[in-house]
Image (spheres, rainbow, N blue to C red):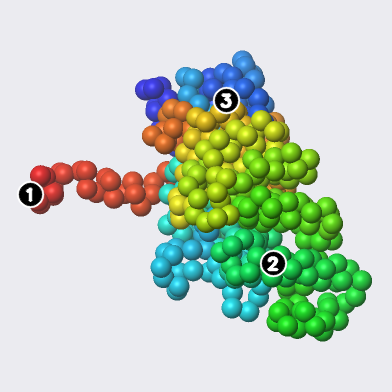
Amino acid sequence: MKNFLLSLFILASIQIVADSILIKGGMVHTGTGERAQLQDILITGKVITDIGNNLVIDGNTQVIEVNGLPVTPGLISPMSNIGIVEINALDVTRDDESELLKSGFSIFNAFNPHSTGIPWNRSNGVTSAISSPSASSFPLFGLGSHFILDGSIDIQGSKDIAMFGRIGSSYGSRAENLSILESLLVLGQQSKQMPVEEVLEMRLADKLELQSQDIIALAQVVNGKLPFVLETNRAVDILQAIALQKKYDLNLILASVEEAPLVIAQLKASNIPVIIDPMDNIPDSFDELGSSLELGKILDNAGIKVMFSTQRSHNYHLMRQGSGNAVAYGMSYESAIRGMSKSVAETFGLVKRGSIEKGNFADIVIWDADPLEPSSFPKLVLINGQTQDLTSRSSKLTERYMNKDNKPSSYKH
């Protein structure tokens, strides 16, 4: 461990001089679903250039001796408000809602790389995230974007990479919402055959007060294969979503799906990926009566691609606690790691991210212990091959109040 800490110190000191970095002797979980093994990782610039044992290096390579500690890809949150919501209770700090736009609402230009939520999640292993608008009373509430969480003012991200929506009992009439949703998909189809201006003149578009941005976004969902994340729970609603996927050839991702075990055969046949919160097993409504702690295991055993979310605002890193809980109830360990990394990258088209593979960007986390244990924390986080500052507001507060030197006597008791 001393060698590891010393290596980190040296790395921070001379990283500018070194041409490459060798992470040596880590228990590497590649994120591909393969079992972890002791390997070395060679990084040149932003990219992973080799993986294996006894790698040949030159004299200008900085070596980090890991001594068997777990190494994973940087975690990717598939659903978050990172960078667009600061304090939920203060509207002036929220850029996740629109009063005018619906399906065409994009949060991309509102992203704040200096949001306090970024260092907190980064110091817990989250290296990038998909941020999206928050749910509204409308079935579709806008477009999410992918952001690299390095805190740089030079924002790195992919704009408008997915549509987000929801159907269920909490948002008015279920039948009406489903009808509106399908009508919106029809409008998206119409835009392939006529100008956007003419689509806007159609009675439904006018009634719903849609804007040109809304129609353009709908066209991307129906005709452009834009990933469409639809949150729903009731078994029959999952079947409705599968029917829409087939009818409109959607690139559909289902979120929450607490009653998925009741329709597991149909879901497996659809080949639709899912996003789940394994900690959410207590029904909040009649849509969730089939909730189960074994949801992750059931989906994994069926061969369904699983990703993870969390309901804890700002603490999106807690998806690793949720995935650990899924493993405790029977899900494969490597499927859980994959669900926080490569599965997200594959599903949302994030190029060269999400796994420790040759040619990918070096988004890598070295952990002090099992990454699926809530008590474990990163020792080192790399984004694009660059060492990240793991300081956060929480760590600063801890240091302030735990260090009792030169403090008034009231701090020392």
Question: Residue at image x 49%, y 35%?
Answer: 325
Mark 3 lies on a secondary structure that is strand
The residue that disc 3 covers is 28
Residue wearing tag 2: 175
Callout in the foreground (2, 1): 2
- The answer to whether residue 271 shows anywhere in this view is no
Q: CA distance from mark 3 to mark 1?
A: 47 Å
Residue at 41% x, 33% y is 376
**Above or below, comparing residue 195 to residue 240 in the picture:** below
- Residue under label 1: 409
Q: Is residue 261 above or below residue 94?
A: above
Q: Which mark is residue 169?
A: none
Q: Quadrant of the N terminus?
A: top left
Helix, strand or loop at mark 2: helix
Q: Residues within 10 Å of mark 2 (few under 14, many from 20)?
A: few
What's under tag 2, amino acid-wise?
Answer: Ala
Please tell me which residue lies in front, 315 or 222.
Answer: 222
Q: CA distance from mark 2 to mark 3?
A: 48 Å
Q: Earlier in the sequence, mark 2 or mark 3?
A: 3
Q: Secondary structure at mark 1?
A: helix
Residue 9 lies in quadrant: top left
Q: Earlier in the sequence, mark 3 or mark 1?
A: 3
Residue 4's spot in the image, x, y percent? Answer: 42, 25
Mark 1 or mark 2, which is nearer the start of the sequence?
A: 2
